[in-house]
Structure formats: C-alpha cells, structure tokens
Image (cartoon, rainbow, N blue to C red):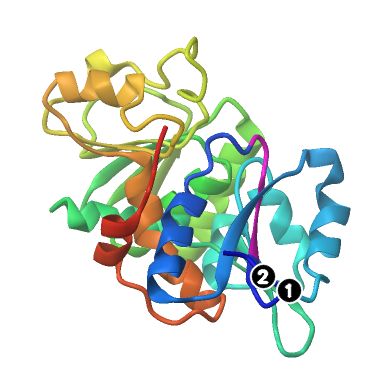
Amino acid sequence: MIDGKTKLIAHIGYPTETFKAPMICNPYFAAKGINAAVIPMGCKAGDYDSFLELVLRLSNVHGALITMPHKVRTLALVDEASAAARIAGACNSVKVDERGLTIGDMFDGEGFVRGLLRHGRRAAGANVLVAGCGGVGSAIAAALASAGALRISLHDTLAPAMSALAGRLKAHYPKLAVSTGSSDPAGYDIVVNATPLGMNNDDPLPLDVDRIAPSTFVGEVVMKTEITPFLAAARAKGCGYQVGTDMLFEQIPAYLEFLGFGTAGVDDMRRLAQIHY
C-alpha cells in the first residue's frame, strides 16, 4: 500500500520490462512493515540528465537505483562517488545526503562476487574473461580484481570502453595481469557475459560456448529470463553457472543499507521475492 508517507525509491532505466528489483524489494518491504516502494521509471538516454536531477528533488524520493543504459553516465552527474564507482566508471545507486549533495555508489560487482562465493567458487587466483565493458562489466571486473583475481581479460565491441577499463584496472591494481581484445573463452576459470546479448530472442550468443571448458564457471547479467540461451548452452556442457538475479539478490542488501533502510538478509529476500519473467 502506497500512501503519502511512503518513501519512494526510483528505479531508473530503459526499457523497464526486465526490471527485477521491485519484485524483490517490495514484497520484502511489505513483509517487514517498511513503508517504502521501488518504482520502475522508464527514462531514455536523451532525457536522463535532467530527469535524474528533478526526481531526486522530490520530497518523498529516498534515492534511486540506476540500470542500463545510464550507469556510466551517472558517474559524471553526481557530486561525489565511492571508490568502487570510480574504479568501475559507473554508478548504479544515487542518494542525496544531509549536505544536499548527490552521492553515487556501485554494487553490481560486489553482488556478483558475493554470488560467486555463495556458489562455492572463489575469485582469488582465478583467470577471468569479462565480455562487456559498460557499467556492469566494469563493476564486475573491478570487484574481481579487488577479490584477488590473477588475470582479467576484457572484450567489448567498443574499443574505447575496453581500453579505458583496462587502464583503470591497471592504475588501481598494478600487479593484476590485464589483457584486451580476444573473446575466446578457452582456458578461463570464470567467464562473464556482461553484454546485453540475451535480452532479445534473436540475439547471438555473446561467446563461443564450444570453447568453454566444463570446469569453467559462467556468470550472466541479463535478467529478462532466468536461463538465457548462453547459460543454457553452458549448462549443457556441464559448467557451473550464476543467473542474473543471483547478482541482484546479493547486492540489494547493500543498496538498502546505502539508502538508509538498515540491514536486510539475503535469505529473507529470496524467500519473499515474487520474481516472474
């Protein structure tokens, strides 16, 4: 039930059809008696700068969750950003602090690594391929580096984004081996699809699954469907895998703490969630 005292969290991106955070957060709020709601808001790129500024001025908006295609752009719009956001080159959450300043943070990478650990895998010492160097891919690469990955290879069709991420990783983690360019997934311990491929039924696979070993752990960020064609193909080869919503479940407690809602349990959220595809 939304009323005049409800604390609204704007969930901003485009398109909104794939949004899953409202189906996790809102049942949790209801069960815990928290008068808050996550509201999807479809905003195209051309309107985003002015829209973000205005929506954060609303007296009953408590902050914003940011998703594609706005994560990278958000970093340039906030007054201050966390180290995680600066290294990733993107933000997926924004709030206004007591000084009236906009503060950005990034939890995609933390969520991915927590999910990896929950699946019994470790980033420490791993050889990793990250396909997609936008906001979410950058955050995942940064978090894997922080967690002790031995080598990270980056691939993106946009060479400037790939090169910029490689530069940030090398600057903050000088001992990390970083390479760019190749999309060949052979020989990696962890392979991540951080591209939008899988959002549409006719999308090609982001990587050549025939080249992925059965021992490789495969991660996905697309949430339009639980088992994307990429995950289905990897699963058929015997690979361990992580679905897109695993990352989301692991990062939402960090989101809520950042926005001032206190500590939330992942297990409670999983039990209460009403996700549909």
Q: Residue at x 27, y 54 (%)?
A: 115
Q: Residue at x 50, y 32 (%)?
A: 195
Residue 31: x and y in percent read: 38, 69
Instruction: Evaluate whether residue 144 shows in this view.
Output: no
Which span of residues is magenta-colored?
9-15
Residue 77: x and y in percent read: 78, 61
Mark 2, residue position:
3
Binning the other alpha carbons within 10 Å of mark 1 as few (below 14), some (14 to 19) or many (20 upward) gives some
Q: Residue furthest bottom?
A: 98
Where disc 1 sits, the SS reads loop
At label 2, the amino acid type is Asp
At label 1, the amino acid type is Asn
Q: Residue at x 77, y 38 (%)?
A: 44
* Residue 10 in the figure: left or right of residue 259: right
Mark 1, residue position:
60
> Mark 2 and mark 1: span between their CA atoms?
10 Å
Query: Vertical placement of 77 versus 70: above or below?
Result: below
Q: Nearer the viewer, residue 203 or 153?
A: 203
Binning the other alpha carbons within 10 Å of mark 2 as few (below 14), some (14 to 19) or many (20 upward) gives few
Our reading of the magenta stretch's main secondary structure is strand
Is residue 53 inside the magenta stretch? Answer: no
Q: Residue at x 42, y 59 (%)?
A: 27
